[in-house]
Amino acid sequence: MIAILKHGTTQEQTDHLISWLQRMNLDIHVSEGAHVTILGLIGDTSRVDMELLSSLEIVESVKRVSEPFKQANRKFHPHDSVIQVGDVKIGGGHFAMMAGPCSVESEEQIIEVARAVKASGANILRGGAFKPRTSPYAFQGMKGEGIELLLKAKADTGLPIVTEIMNISTLDLFNDVDIIQVGARNMQNFDLLKELGKTNKPILLKRGLANTLQELLMSAEYIMSEGNENIILCERGIRTFETYTRNTLDLSAVSVLHDLSHLPVIVDPSHATGKAKLVPPMALAAVAAGADGLIIEVHNNPSCALCDGAQSLTPAQFDQLNKQVNRIWEAVQ
């Protein structure tokens, strides 16, 4: 349920109304715009008398929110959320370019790639330390050592870092990580989501391989329900009957998510297509569709990569792509 307050309502009147609602064991989410204040009522709202609430002098209107996701809902928060990561802003007209290797392989590799993508315009470094792999015999990542190498690359370049968490037990290793990524396979790991909700770190939440957009937003709701509102949604392709590409990139998700939610939305064309030659056209299409950012896999020697070399761009290819991305971004703005 949301209550829209009339323009001119004082802070004292707002606080008094919030206190009254909280006595009904409701959590109140306050969204303040230039000319309107919206109170989002979270919890069992069946005890709220809508007619009484609507009749109050300071209340413009009261509406029930039918969708199961509340805090992630644009009705609760009409204006775009902007996620701050160091000096980088994501969402609300700010574009983020995240780039780096699928997995951290050595200090030399990650620093070389970090320097290259920064020179080409990337403002966030991605790199996998923990790697969820389909085969138990495939390279599983450098784990804690990989995070240490990412931090060295951050110190060398100044780029904030994003890397994936797989298990609650490793959360302490992510204390100095700027953005914690929740991968597609963990999108509905609810215990993990709730623990991440108790942190104040930005969370990059990827859509699962076979999950609906409502399920993605409900996963975001798990994080937000614990107090962490710093969430970036990521469309990375879903599993369909098509076999030519690794997954099917659902670019309509960008527009739908922006319509339903205030959270920023980025796109991962690398995992979606699985082929380096398909990454640039899908990246440009994502920007044209209104994405708030991209996450691109870049490797200094893709043919020798320990993970996902087939979908990784070279630094030179990434440099060319980023120039094209900037032109598309300027055009759609």
Image (tube, helix red, strand yellow):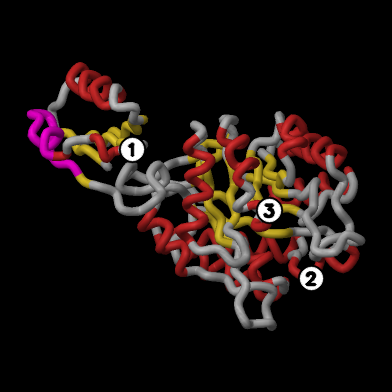
Residue 177 vs 210, above or below: the answer is: above
The residue under the point 27% across, 34% down is 39
Which element carries disc 1, helix, strand or loop? loop
Residue at the top extreme, as displayed? 12
Residue type, mark 1 in image: Asp
Which numbered disc, 2 or 1, marks the residue closer to the eye? 1
Disc 3 versus disc 1: distance between alpha carbons?
Answer: 43 Å
x, y percent for residue 187: 61, 53
Q: Residue at x 11, y 39 (%)?
A: 51
Q: Where is mark 1, residue-wise?
A: 44
Name the residue carrying label 3.
99
Residue 62 in the image: state x and y as whole percent.
18, 42
Note whether residue 6 is visible: no
The answer to whether marks 2 and 3 mark residues whose Cβ atoms lie closer than 8 Å is no
Residue 55 belongs to the span the image colors magenta: yes
Q: In which quarter of the image is the N terminus?
A: top left
SS class, disc 2:
helix
Q: Give the range drawn in magenta.
A: 51-62
